[in-house]
Image (cartoon, rainbow, N blue to C red):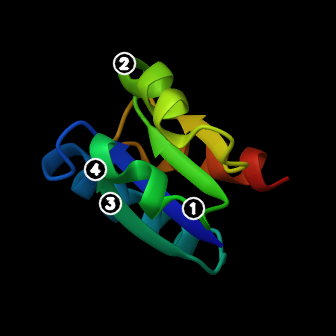
Amino acid sequence: MRIVAVCGAGIGTSAILQTNAERAIAREGLRGVVSASDLAHVADQAADAQVILTSPELVEAVRAAIGRNYAELVVIENYFSVDEIADKLIDAIG
């Protein structure tokens, strides 16, 4: 599974989300690669992703940036909650 964590600048917030998503997939025994991206490069970064993680504030901008990408867009409220990330990833991959 390929997961992209997105924030506005692709540095701080997406790095936190990336790290906690890696913890979540390890904890759940899932296999996957998580990368961080900024909004400007999300279309390229997420071209082969199954899941895109982002904040509520960026949902519409991410949707506009990715266009017809078929990745599941998952909104994370608390980037520090491995539990929330794990639960939402499991829901997204069904």
Residue bearing the label numbered 2: 57
Q: Secondary structure at mark 4?
A: helix
Q: Position of residue 25 (x, y in %)?
A: 56, 68
- Mark 1 or 4: in front is 1
Residue bearing the label numbered 1: 47
- Mark 3 or 1: in front is 1
State the separation of the CA atoms marked 3 and 1: 13 Å
State the separation of the CA atoms marked 4 and 3: 5 Å
Q: Earlier in the sequence, mark 3 or mark 1?
A: 3
Q: Is residue 77 above or below residue 9?
A: above
Q: Earlier in the sequence, mark 2 or mark 4?
A: 4
Q: Cβ–Cβ below 8 Å for labels 4 and 3?
A: yes
Q: Cβ–Cβ below 8 Å for labels 3 and 2?
A: no
- Mark 1 or 2: in front is 1
Question: 63 left or right of 21?
Answer: right
Q: Earlier in the sequence, mark 1 or mark 4?
A: 4
Q: Cβ–Cβ below 8 Å for labels 3 and 1?
A: no
Comparing 21 with 46, the one in front is: 46
Q: Earlier in the sequence, mark 1 or mark 2?
A: 1
Q: Secondary structure at mark 2?
A: helix
State the separation of the CA atoms marked 1 and 2: 21 Å
Q: Residue at x 15, y 53 (%)?
A: 11
Residue bearing the label numbered 4: 14
State the separation of the CA atoms marked 1 and 4: 17 Å
Amino acid carrying label 1: it is Ala
Q: Is residue 80 visible?
A: no
